[in-house]
Image: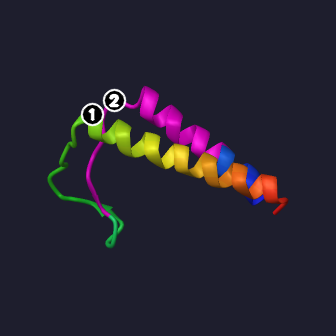
Amino acid sequence: MVGTLLLIFGAMGIAGAIFGKDFYAADVLGLHEFKPKQNIPIWLGRLVFGLAGVGLIAVGIKMLMRGE
């Protein structure tokens, strides 16, 4: 079950990397955006989304292969 969800969210992350146009920095600890919206470069946003998506897919496949 969890492996399947990881595959779905990983695919959504890769889709976000492919189709995303604007990426913004956010304060992760405070869970809110910085007051002046700070754009990050498109290549960096796509890199982060793509790596996160690939990582989620890899962990999901590993979990499905082990039968969890």
The front one of 42 and 62 is 62
Outermost residue, left side: 36
Q: Is residue 62 left or right of residue 25?
A: right
Q: Which mark is on residue 42?
A: 1
Instruction: Name the residue type under label 1.
Output: Ile
- The magenta segment: 8-27
Question: Is 64 displayed left or right of 16 in the figure?
Answer: right
State the image coordinates of residue 32 (x, y, percent, origin top left): 32, 63
Give the x, y percent position of residue 56: 58, 51
- Give, as a three-letter code, the residue at label 2: Lys
Instruction: Report how far apart the C-alphas of labels 2 and 1 lie in the structure.
Output: 7 Å
Residue linked to disc 2? 21
**Tag 2 and tag 1, C-beta contact below 8 Å:** yes
Q: How many marks?
A: 2
Quarter of the figure with residue 12: top right
Left or right relative to 9: residue 41: left
